[in-house]
Amino acid sequence: MASLRINYDDSLISVHDIKSILNQLPGIISIKDKFTLSDVQTTSTEKYSILDLLLSGLAILSALRDENGKIVDFKFEFINEAGCRLNMAPKEAFNNMTLLNFLPSHKDSDIFQTYCNVLETGVAREIESLDFEDYYGGKKLKRAFDINVTKFADGIMVIWQDCTQRKQNEILLKEKAQLSELIEKAPFDAIFIFDVLQQTLVYSNNNFEILTGYTSGDVDSFSNNIMFDLLHPDDIPHTITHLNNLAQSDDDTVLENEYRIKHKSGQYRWMKSRNKVYKRGTDGQLQQIIGIIFDNTKTKVLEEKLLKRDKLIKSFFENSGDGFLLIQGETGIIEDCNQALLKLFGFELVSQVIGRHIGEFHKDLFRDESIINEMLNTLKETGFWAGDYEFIKADNSTFWGNLSMVEIIEFDKLLHFVTIKDITERLNYQNNLEKLTNELKINLELREKFIKVIAHDIRGPFHSMLGLTDIILEDFDIMSKEEIKDYILKVYLSQNNLYSFVNNVLEWAILQSGQYKVKREVFDICSLIHIINDLLEWEYTAKKIRIHFTDNGLCRKINSDLNAVKSIVVNLINNAIKFSYRNSQIEITLSKIEGALKLSVNDSGQGIEKNILKRIFDSKDAYTSIGTENEKGTGLGLSFCIEMSEKLGLKFEIESTPRVGTSVSVIFPEEFVVKE
């Protein structure tokens, strides 16, 4: 890599080299900086002093390349005193320093690529008023520079001047020129000088005639009290106050005044003026003021219309039966509310609401970020948001309200105007209607299901009994006593099944209709089980099934609905008999679980498949299957037991393994168990 080394300890650069450098200096360098060195004898230190005399910053940088020859950075080989001053760093800071390490923003501003292009093409570049932001002297500053870049050996020579102040002055001059042009072109502005002591108009320009209709001759004809001739009587007092304020203020103070002037046509027009002291007497007393005046009639008429509209809106705001809120769009802070909202939320004073976040009065809407984002996006797209939500009152009770929100801009300020209507009564009506509709639907479904069950399942037992009795009647004379007894037993079992069926249907129908009322009383659960076993003796003896009851010494009195519990247990034992194999055993046990009492009916029958077990709990439809000896059922037994247990506040459990058996349990919570 070819590079030019310049330091204070060697003499690698000759007087001729310095001449070459100076000859390359651009036109932006003062001509005083260019001088002839042909007769100058210099030491290695003195030749740098020559470059340090330049008023512009000058740096010589050598190219740093990668293995492919691509320029990746530039190394400082030399920088003069002006360059150090402009970069707010001593010369030592540039020893072995690269450009991008010292000024990393060069690369982001594309100037680095410009430097590379100059070196590669050999074409110098001049850049005027380049805005540049980087760290100088430890501070991040935004500055402007005039820059000249020239190829120098295998590097570049950069010369630059800080033109920040010049550029700022140019901008200020341009702004002032634009302002002057704007003032000159303002068609309705008039300039006047008013003598406070003489009460006369000393000077007015042509625009004054345009605004008021009065010529200079008309002005001269006014009396010595022009203020009373031109001003509306209602505006004279505050205009006198305005003049007194000017008299007491500094001469550079500008004050505004608004008043009505009688136009030559006889109509009063609103004017607005900006006034300052123009002349004082030797005693310091205000003598004359100078002002710029313009017609403000359209603005005042609009303001009056807006004021009337605001009064109308305010009246509607205060007298409406709906609650109104004005909320800051960015923060959600409440700025205003009406009396209806205070009443709606149970507050007495506006101060109890203003300044608080809207989220304090709502359970979910202004606390869920996803809902907030959806609301804000909808407001931006449509300008409107509405929905029914639950709100919190002052006493922490809640009510349902319909919220509608619109987005408004007031003086560049984003606001949300919110209306809240109490819809509790409407929702109650809707809920009652839905409840009645659901009840009607349930009753219709219940009736349909009831009819289907009756039509389908009641025929079986009747056909069975009719067939058996028909056989007995026809063959009675030739039948033995044992055969007659066997047929009578079958008739009994069929009648008993029919009774169980009718009883299940009736109890299930009452439960489904919602008319069942729990009647709690204290009874002995062990005695109840013995009674049920005696009641079902014919069923389990017919299949030669043994029932074994183990109370584990836990016979307890239960406080629950006796008839309901009896129906549950009867159904459980009946199911166990139905699905148990002949000559098997059914275990009925009582056990204690942390103060609760658990009644379990366990059989070693055919069991229940998992998908069927899930269907029993999840489905609203009754599910039935054939017993071990083709016994049929309504499918309402387990459904009734599950729903009745829920009604009584009991826990119902089923554990079953196909071809192994089933365990069905009813758990009485501790509060149902009577302590003796």
Image (spheres, rainbow, N blue to C red):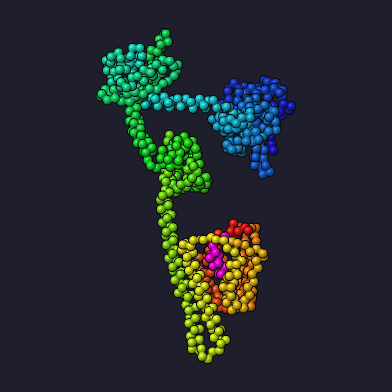
Q: Decide which of 438, 580 is in the foreground and name it.
A: 580
Q: Can you say which quadrant of the picture contains the C terminus?
A: bottom right
As drawn, 655 above or below 154: below
Give the prevailing secondary structure in the magenta stretch.
helix
Which residue, as the protein is rendered here, is positioned at the far top?
282
* Number of numbered callouts drawn: 0
* Quarter-of-image position of residue 379: top left
Q: Residue 572: horizontal and vertical position, in percent? A: 57, 69
Q: Decide which of 308, 610 is in the foreground and name it.
A: 610
* Quarter-of-image position of residue 448: bottom left
Please name the residue shown 58% across and 67% down the image.
528
Q: Is residue 103 left or right of residue 634?
A: right
Region rendered in magenta = 559-571
Please name the residue shown 51% across and 61% down the image.
518
As drawn, 303 above or below 375: above
Task: Say whether residue 566 is visible.
Answer: yes
Q: Residue 22: horizontal and vertical position, in percent? A: 62, 26
Q: Can you say which quadrant of the picture contains the N terminus?
A: top right
Task: Say whether residue 20 is visible.
Answer: no
Is 265 magenta? The answer is: no
Which residue, as the protein is rendered here, is positioned at the far bottom?
478
Q: Is residue 327 left or right of residue 310?
A: right
Is 567 magenta? The answer is: yes
Q: Residue 566: horizontal and vertical position, in percent? A: 55, 67
